[in-house]
Amino acid sequence: GTGTGTAGSTKHRNDARHPILTRCSPCRGPVRGGTTVVLRGRRLRLTTAVFFGGRRGRRLRVLSASEIEVLAPPGHGRVHLRLASAVGSAGITRVAYSYVKARRSEPMGVRPLGPDGGRYPMTVNEGRGSGL
């Protein structure tokens, strides 16, 4: 995937007052959680909670009527997102978030590439300076 999920509607009734989620970015992150996820849709100002499967996201921040930000909780596999609002639950959306296991030698989203194309290990000097 491209890291962006989309959806058209929810599985439950779509009351005109409920927020509607249409996409997320990124739509994947580590099983330990902690990824900041931006959600887009309509009437998102009414959102009071975001659930990743059965787990509640943390640090919900409403950016606008069409965009919110939330910290993904720990989890496993592929889960659907659900929004809750002051007017009730908006149901389970078709927008999904995937938890992936990061390889121990490589932080999420970082690939060691250099003049050798990444064939040899890289060393990062965290000391006082390299004199360069």
Image (cartoon, rainbow, N blue to C red):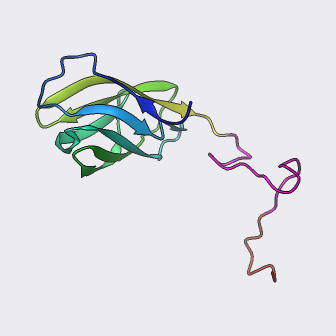
Q: Which residues are magenta?
A: 103-123
Q: Quadrant of residue 89?
A: top left
Report if residue 104 lies within the magenta region: yes
Residue sticking out furthest to the bottom: 131
Q: Residue at x 19, y 45 (%)?
A: 45
Q: Residue at x 69, y 40 (%)?
A: 103
Q: Residue at x 19, y 39 (%)?
A: 43
In the depicted structure, whether residue 42 falls above or below residue 76: below
Q: Position of residue 101 (x, y in %)?
A: 62, 35
SS assignment for the magenta stretch, majority? loop
Q: Is residue 111 left or right of residue 16?
A: right
Q: Residue at x 63, y 46 (%)?
A: 109
Q: Position of residue 17 (x, y in %)?
A: 11, 31
Closest to the observer, 60 or 62: 62
In the depicted structure, whether residue 4 falls above or below residue 132: above
Q: Quadrant of residue 85?
A: top left
Report if residue 69 lies within the magenta region: no
Q: Quadrant of residue 86?
A: top left
Q: Position of residue 13 (x, y in %)?
A: 18, 17
Q: Is residue 70 left or right of residue 129?
A: left
Number of marks in picture: 0
Closest to the observer, 1 or 96: 1
**Which image quarter is the N terminus in?**
top right
Q: Position of residue 132 (x, y in %)?
A: 81, 81
